Amino acid sequence: MTDDLFSRAADADHDLTPLADRMRPRTVDEFEGQAHLLGEGRFLTRAIAADRVPSLILWGPPGTGKTTLARVLAAHTGARFVPFSAVDGTVKQVREIIARAAEERATRRRRTILFIDEIHRFNKAQQDALLPAAERGVVTLIGATTENPSFSVIPALISRCKVLTLEPLDPGAVERILRRALADCDRGLGDLGIEVVDEAIAFIAGRSRGDARWALSALDLSVRHAREADPPGAVDVPCVEEAAQAKALLYDRAGEEHYNVVSAFIKSLRGSDPDAALYWMFRMLEAGEDPLFVLRRMVIFASEDIGNADPRALQVAVAADAAFQRLGMPEGAFPLAQACTYLAVAPKSNAAVEAIAGPRRDIREHGPLPVPLHLRNAPTGLMKDLGYGDGYRYPHDEGGFASGEIYLPDALARKRYYLPRSSGLESQIRARLARLRGENDPGEGHPGPGEEEDK
């Protein structure tokens, strides 16, 4: 009880409670955004009207209203709302909450909404502990996560919940939230008497990237900054820029967005777009990614997506890695940018990667086929007597190429694993290889139209 009294006192003190918490919507009418869930005839609207809110997983970026929506649902259904943090809580505490919920349902016929913030931080055992209660309806589980539930929530739990995706708020919705806070004299900033110009509101809304919590925090800082000036002034764009720190980049090195940004970087390189590749690379670096991770990806890319179309690409990537380790940041950004742009504009070929699957498949299917006798090493007289090395033709004695010689096991003779593309240096390799293969096997194809043989 004492804790509750102190909590209520803190809520009433604007200096102790963040503006975003004070302005948290209490009803569906106050809730901004997510019209695809709360619009007329939409899923949650119908669930609230029927008083049948199921267990849910709310998935979306920070500041889109996941916690608020859970509270609003509890308020509209008359259920007990029990918030729980997956970061600090234990399985024992979860079981105690479930036991209390079972008692409430049995004695008072009152439902409990168990809201678990950052549910993706629960391990499998902790998530397993929720399954029986969610399945029997002892609690209505609402989990909030910024991570893709497919990767962070166990399938058994997902199957018992409906996954709802929350989208970043559009600037108009954020502006309405800010204006409501400025007009509210009870929970907001209306009693401070500070003018906030329209341009400043639009500026904050635009910088928020759809995060209402960040926008309200920026507004609160800006208003207090203007109020403490001598003399107090209005909140304009320069005031906001000075008072509010820059929005942190949306890039979680351990989460889904990490993989999304990395994917965009690699696909930009593969698509030969140096501008996009630079953007995504520095998006990672500015957000604190380890440059050695980025360099490792570029070394892989140089072989995987460029290969022999431009063998220098691998040299550039490896040299950039060595240069960075010698220079560090900030100068290390130079070789990073050089390698990034070189890889992006280089001709592309994945022929080396494609060449891997064939031999592996044949090794699995045929096992360790014997080495042909003429290719075997014959260091002893016995081996020579057994025919080891007999008939081997030394290519240098025949102008550098022994036409008709077979180097694969007999069962795989004439197999073709490496199929060069027609880009960059590989077009010349393709022409030369076609000529050599044609000499080995007259029925084999020759270079296609427009391809010159390497003389």
Image (tube, rainbow, N blue to C red):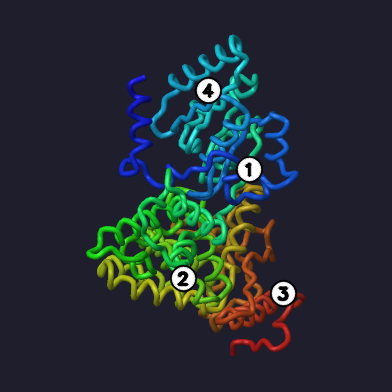
In the rendered view, tell whether residue 218 sits above or below residue 163.
below
Assign a secondary structure to mark 3: loop
Task: Say which residue label 4 marks.
Answer: 129
Callout 2: SS: helix
Mark 1 or mark 4: name the one nearer the start of the chain. 4
1 vs 3, front mark = 1
Q: Determine which residue is flagged by label 2.
A: 279
Give the amino acid at mark 1: Leu
* Numbered-mark total: 4
Task: Tell me the quadrant of the picture where the C terminus can be found.
Answer: bottom right
Lower position in the chain sequence, tag 1 or tag 2: 1
Q: Which label sits on residue 164?
A: 1
Per the model, the C-alpha gap separating discs 2 and 4 is: 43 Å
Q: Amino acid at mark 4?
A: Ala
Among numbered discs 1 and 3, the one appearing first in the sequence: 1
Nearer mark to the viewer, of 2 and 3: 2
Between 227 and 168, the residue placed more toward the observer is 227
Earlier-in-chain disc, 3 versus 4? 4
CA distance separating discs 3 and 4: 66 Å
**Contact flag, marks 2 and 3 (Cβ < 8 Å):** no
Residue at screen point 56% across, 42% down: 151
Give amino acid for label 3.
Asp
CB contact under 8 Å: marks 1 and 4: no
Q: Which residue is mark 3?
A: 441
